[in-house]
Amino acid sequence: MRRELLHIYGPFSICSFGLFLLIGLLVFVTLAEKHPLYRRLGLQDKYLKILLVGVLAGLIGGRLLSIISCPQAFESIGHMLSPWEPGYSILGAVLAVVTVVPYLRYLGVPILPFFDLITLYAPLWQSVSRIGCFFAGCCHGAPTTLPWGFTYTDPKSSAPLYVRMHPTQLYSSALLFAIFLLLFFVLQKKLRKPGQMVAAYLMLMSAERFFVDFLRGDRVDVPSVAGGFFSLDQLVALLIFAVSIIFFLGATIIGTRRGVHKQ
């Protein structure tokens, strides 16, 4: 697996992570535009503007949490400031996207239905991006003797070389794809109240990160919590999961009351 697919000039190159991140984004945009909710929300002339703001917020938030939780993954300030280079926290990106809310208000776009739409396809984008992580060697797993463990030999890889490790990037990719299938084929038919899909996505996504993190080799444990049993990302995931449960219950109660009033 190669981190750099094609060197262009100087510090510029086509990296595997950036390529898969872009592929995932294109799939995300294309599928969201085909969903019936896209037209009902009147997003035809607003979607790309919102997406640009959301992607920028996600990149900044994802990078910041990654720097805080795993600073050793970055070779230099240039690496930190290069958006095409690996080293993003999905949890940080998700938290940062909340900053889009004021912009949605400004454009007059219903907030919860909009997030219901994008969180439907978000895990698919994340699943594709994780394949880029696998190529780049970031988000690598802990050492293992299991037969499906993977060994990196590319000198530019972000992972330790010549060590058999859990392919945690592929574990995450498979689980996120399963989350997408569950949301798309099952839950969107059952969760009709605004905000329920957002909460379901956040619960599933944070649970995926929490459990896979036990096998991550780049995790940063928090010694002051449970004797270092949990990492910083796991604590963030637990917080997101807890808040999402409360949010789901609130969306359900409010949605039910509105339904009763309409009747």
Image (tube, rainbow, N blue to C red):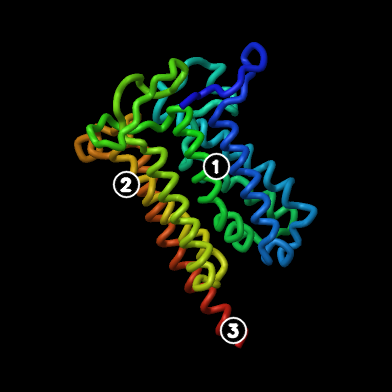
| Left or right placement of residue 83 versus residue 137 in this view | right
Q: Amino acid at mark 2?
A: Phe
Q: Is residue 262 visible?
A: yes
Query: Residue at the location (70% across, 56% down)?
Result: 33
Query: Residue at the location (49% across, 62% down)?
Result: 183
Residue position marked by numbered label 2 in the rendering: 211
N-term-proximal mark, 2 vs 1: 1
Q: Secondary structure at mark 1?
A: helix
Query: Residue at the location (49% across, 59% down)?
Result: 181
Q: Position of residue 67 (x, y in %)?
A: 46, 27
Quadrant (top left, top right, bottom left, bottom right) of the C terminus:
bottom right
Residue position marked by numbered label 3 in the rendering: 261
- Whole-angstrom CA distance, mark 2 to mark 1, is 22 Å
Q: Amino acid at mark 3?
A: His
State the residue lying farthest toward the front: 147
Residue position marked by numbered label 1 in the rendering: 96
Q: Amino acid at mark 1?
A: Ala
Q: Secondary structure at mark 3?
A: helix
Q: Position of residue 45 (x, y in %)?
A: 80, 53
